[in-house]
């Protein structure tokens, strides 16, 4: 029998000011996510995300995926389509999973898995602020 031990006490916090945040419920897409050494597909907290094929802010049924690369609007992963930042790690090992997307708040750059693309920071400016 196989047992999986999960640590629920060391959750990563990407917020600079934890008491000042607005987040919405989203479903994170599992497409293209690579399994880690434990065989889990984890989308880390602090990942810039946006709707896969349309804005999740306009259509809450849209799945979200990472949006932190060069590219024009509408291209897969294009930072110009970023709409928010994942609040917590999301485990998509068994398919799309629920998560929380920060749409207003202050993010600590030192706690992110990777630096936000300049275009992502630009399109979220005024709603999501990245601080050192």
Image: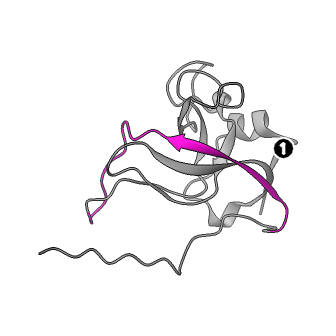
Residue 121 image-quadrant placement: top right
* Placement of 105 over or under 27, stated as above or below: below
Q: In the depicted view, which residue is nearer to us: 72 or 6?
A: 6
Image quadrant holding the N terminus, namely bottom left
Q: Position of residue 29 (x, y in %)?
A: 45, 38
Q: In the image, is 63 to the left or to the right of 86?
A: left
Image quadrant holding the C terminus, namely bottom right
Q: In the image, is 95 to the left or to the right of 52?
A: left
* Placement of 132 over or under 75, stated as above or below: below
Outermost right residue: 126
* Placement of 113 over or under 103, stated as above or below: below
Q: In the image, is 23 to the left or to the right of 79?
A: right
Residue 58 image-quadrant placement: top right
- Say what secondary structure mark 1 lies in: loop
Residue 45 image-quadrant placement: bottom right
Outermost left residue: 1
Q: Position of residue 81 (x, y in %)?
A: 65, 28
Residue at 64 percent of width and 46 percent of height: 25
Tell me, yes or no, whether the highlighted magenta stretch contains residue 10.
Answer: no
What residue does disc 1 label? 127
Residue at 53 percent of width and 79 percent of height: 10
Q: Position of residue 122 (x, y in %)?
A: 78, 36
Q: Which residues are magenta?
A: 19-38
Q: Main secondary structure of the magenta part?
A: loop
Q: Residues within 10 Å of mark 1 (few under 14, many from 20)?
A: some
Q: In the image, is 61 to the left or to the right of 128?
A: left
Residue at 30 percent of width and 53 percent of height: 35
Residue at 82 percent of width and 67 percent of height: 17
């Amino acid at each position: 029998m196989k047992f999986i031990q999960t640590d629920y006490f060391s959750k990563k916090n990407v917020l600079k000011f934890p008491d000042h945040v607005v987040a919405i419920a989203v479903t994170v897409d599992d497409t293209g996510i690579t399994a880690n050494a434990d065989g889990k597909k984890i989308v880390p907290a602090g990942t810039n995300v946006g709707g896969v094929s349309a804005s999740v802010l306009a259509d809450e049924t849209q799945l979200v995926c990472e949006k932190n690369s060069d590219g024009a609007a509408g291209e897969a992963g294009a930072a110009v389509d970023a709409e928010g930042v994942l609040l917590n790690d999301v485990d998509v090992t068994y398919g799309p999973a629920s998560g929380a997307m920060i749409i207003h708040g202050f993010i600590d750059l030192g706690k992110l898995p990777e630096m936000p693309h300049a275009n992502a920071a630009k399109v979220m400016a005024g709603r999501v602020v990245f601080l050192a």
